[in-house]
Amino acid sequence: MKKIFPILAILTAGLLSYALYEALIVAPTEQTMGDVQRIFYYHVPSAWTAFLLFTINFVASIVYLIRRNSRADAVAVVTAEVGVVFCTVVLVTGPLWARPVWGIWWTWDVRLTSTLVLWLIYVSYIMLRRFSTSGQTPVLAAALAVFGALDVPLVYFSIWYFRTQHPQPVIGGGGSIDPRMLHVLLINWLAFSCFAFLICWSRYRLERLQRDVEEMQSLESLLEPRSVR
Amino acid sequence: MSLLSNITAATLAKDIRLEWRSKDAINSMLFFALLVVVVFSFSFDPLAEESRQIAGGLIWVSFLFAAVVALNQTWAREIRNQVLDAYRVSPAPANSLFLAKALGNFIFVAILEALMTPLFVMFYKLRPLGPAWQLIPIAALGTWALVVNGTFFAAMSLRTRAREIMLPLLLFPISIPALLAMVRSTTAILTGEESAKFWIVLLLAYDVVFTTGCLLLFETVLQAE
Amino acid sequence: MSYLYAAYAATWIIHIVYLASVVRRYGRLKKEMDDLKGK
């Protein structure tokens, strides 16, 4: 299993470099926005990846609530963290795209705002995990993840309606996309998905090691001779 | 079903009685609510037309703060007297405890809102241009939205470091759709410029979804906490 | 155009910072594990 990792890492690095080349050089320049539009090739795949990771988190949380399987909990932690990382990328690249195009840093664009709320929900999830001193933190966190997932459609609808009442510029634009741009978009999505997989794998190994260490520490303290106290 | 409602009613009555006798929380909440209204009034001193645009947001933000202060002490009495352990081993359904707490908080926050509203109307010279009766369902649904999730998250935060800050950290992000609905609908009614119907329906949907979620998961959280 | 490069750079900086923190924590835990095993 461990042998595969370096090979996949090199392949992914190659794929990411190729995707970068496609995004910066090969993709045609957009008519109205110019080269700045190329941020799209990083912004959108990051968003899709974050949503995928959060979906996995939701599934893992449900599995954990039903089965109390510690691997499911580990997957939940990992996907939440890595999801927040990708979500952060979306929230940083979004304004960097909006500023030169519309002159404003932020817009209450449906997708960007929904992503912000999603980011907030998952950061609160991570904070619960960090701050909770209960032995049953995984259960509480799983409950929060379920709540977060239930919230997502409500978030989207409320902001969508809010936006139709107060129209704002739409990042990413609607309408059809040039097939050459779609091609570059999909390559970048593939590259970032592989990258996300590798990060999750690494983080998962870290999580397993953490749990092993904690287990050994508690065994240690159990086996310590009483006189030490 | 009747067991649930009997225990809920009994627990709720107990809480109200305890609160009425000590008047701990209610006095501090009242004063806090008054302070919030006054401080906000110093920050914003708008003309009548402008005040209608922003009052909706201001009112709900202050209600939100008052609700958080109320919610933080939801379980305080239970923790002090190890009541939760007793609940865990009793055959009483966990949901009756949850409903009693949530209803208690709802009544509490509703009283606070009822007291703060005239102050706001006075300070901001508010006169709703839209159908004012709609403010009642908005207030009820909105308050329930905050209280139902708040009671649940207060239970989740019981064993965390920095417990008091954990509750708003968990509550605010999840409540964003409800908060948006509360603010926009109140503003719609005050300005009379648009219909609040969509927001009221959204609040109703939010309340249904999360009340169900809380009822389904509270037992798990109570056992886990 | 600097916005384009800033966006791409920001993306990679965010990822690298996170990966670095994972690697660092892994190193520290590995050391702790070795210490525990050594005892």
Image (cartoon, coloured by chain):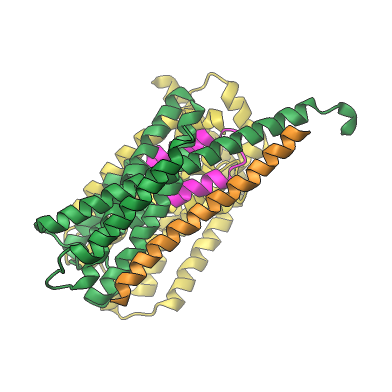
Chain colours: A green, B yellow, C orange
Magenta stretch bounds: A120-147
Q: Residue B112, percent across and down?
A: 45, 55
The correct choice, above or below, for C6 with respect to B213 in the image is: below
Q: Residue B10, percent across and down?
A: 51, 29
Tell me the chief SS of the magenta region.
Answer: helix
Q: Is residue B65 left or right of residue B198?
A: right
Residue B215 visible in the shown view: no
Measuring 40% from the left and 61% from the top, which residue is drawn there?
C12
Q: Nearer the viewer, residue A75 or C29?
A: C29
The quarter of the picture where residue A226 lies is top right
| A128 drawn magenta | yes
Residue B95 visible in the shown view: yes
Measuring 26% from the left and 45% from the top, which residue is drawn there?
A153
Q: Is residue B114 left or right of residue B32?
A: left
Q: Residue A75, percent across and down?
A: 45, 36
Q: Nearer the viewer, residue A23 or A112?
A: A23
Outermost residue, top side: B91
